[in-house]
Image (cartoon, rainbow, N blue to C red):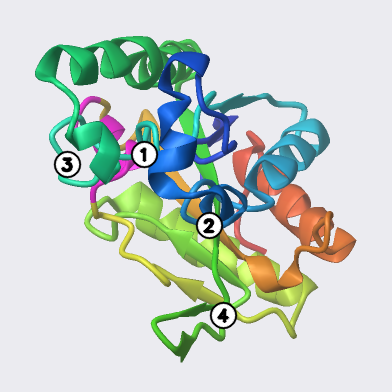
Amino acid sequence: MTGRSLLFTCEHATNAIPEELAFLREALGADIWETHRAYDIGAIEAGRELASRCGSSVIASTVSRLVVDTNRSEHHPKVFSEPIRALSRAQRESILAFFHRPHREMVATSLRGRMPVLHVAVHSFTPSLDGDERTMDVGLLYDPARGPERELAAEWKRRLNARLPALRLRRNAPYRGAADGLPTAFRRVFLPDDYAGFELELNQRAFDGAWPPEWLDALAETLRELTSPTSAAD
């Protein structure tokens, strides 16, 4: 494996609402803002910890995904919540211009200055969905059609399993890595040898204000190894 620089992002970092859209609090109800529907609980904490341990940085969204989902493309049906979809086209365009595009442009600029690069978008997921328990602890989402990502995923999983044998780790779960998301958008722009993109998914069951230290240690150690110029399979 060749060396890569490393960049972390967090597209669902916050439940913040800009003052000019304060009507959302009433439109969607007071209870929703502390739930997964508003943001990825614990994701920014993981992103900051991993960036610090890896000597990198994290670029985070500034508004709730109920304002606009920076992990979705502009034309995705779920880029806006229902109350935002009810606004005028000009108002929706303003939200894209102020909150969606700047995040993506900032990430793109940082990526271009770091190539070859490994981009890790940090997310979290709920322990159950629609009554079905999600048994994995960590998911590594990537595009298996891109050779470098496929190889990195296999090696990352192997190294994590070696450090934490009890960690329940799955690839492309609980979501598909090639679905609409920020790494998918950048795969259309950058060549596989220049850009590898992952969504790191962490089970919120393990978050109690902080993530298990052994998870953070293992994730950071393996990422440092994978991006080292001398990285190679043991």
Question: Mark 3 or mark 4, which is nearer the start of the sequence?
Answer: 3
The numbered mark at residue 71 is 1
Region of the chain picked out in magenta, as a range: 180-189
Q: Which image quarter is the C terminus in?
A: bottom right
Task: Check contact, mark 1 vs mark 4: CB within 8 A.
Answer: no
Q: Callout 4: 10 Å neighbours few (<14), some, many (20+)?
A: some
- Which mark is drawn over residue 76? 3
Q: Quadrant of residue 208?
A: bottom right
Question: What residue is drawn where x is 76% and y is 63%?
Answer: 207
Q: Position of residue 61 (x, y in %)?
A: 52, 27
Q: Amino acid at mark 4?
A: Met
Q: State which quadrant residue 98 falls in.
A: top left
Closer to the camera: disc 4 or disc 3?
Answer: 3
Question: Which type of secondary structure does the marked residue at label 3 adopt?
Answer: loop
Helix or strand or loop: what does disc 1 sit on? loop
- Displayed quadrant of residue 175: bottom left
Marks 3 and 1, Cα distance to the nearest angstrom?
10 Å
Name which residue lies at 52% across and 53% down. Answer: 32
Disc 3 marks a residue whose amino acid type is His
Q: CA distance from mark 4 to mark 2?
A: 18 Å
> Which secondary structure class fits the magenta region best?
helix
Q: Is residue 191 left or right of residue 31?
A: left
Amino acid type, callout 2: His
- The residue closer to the viewer here, 134 or 167, is 134
Report the Cα–Cα distance between label 1 and label 4.
22 Å
The picture places residue 173, in percent across and down from the top left corner, at 42, 71
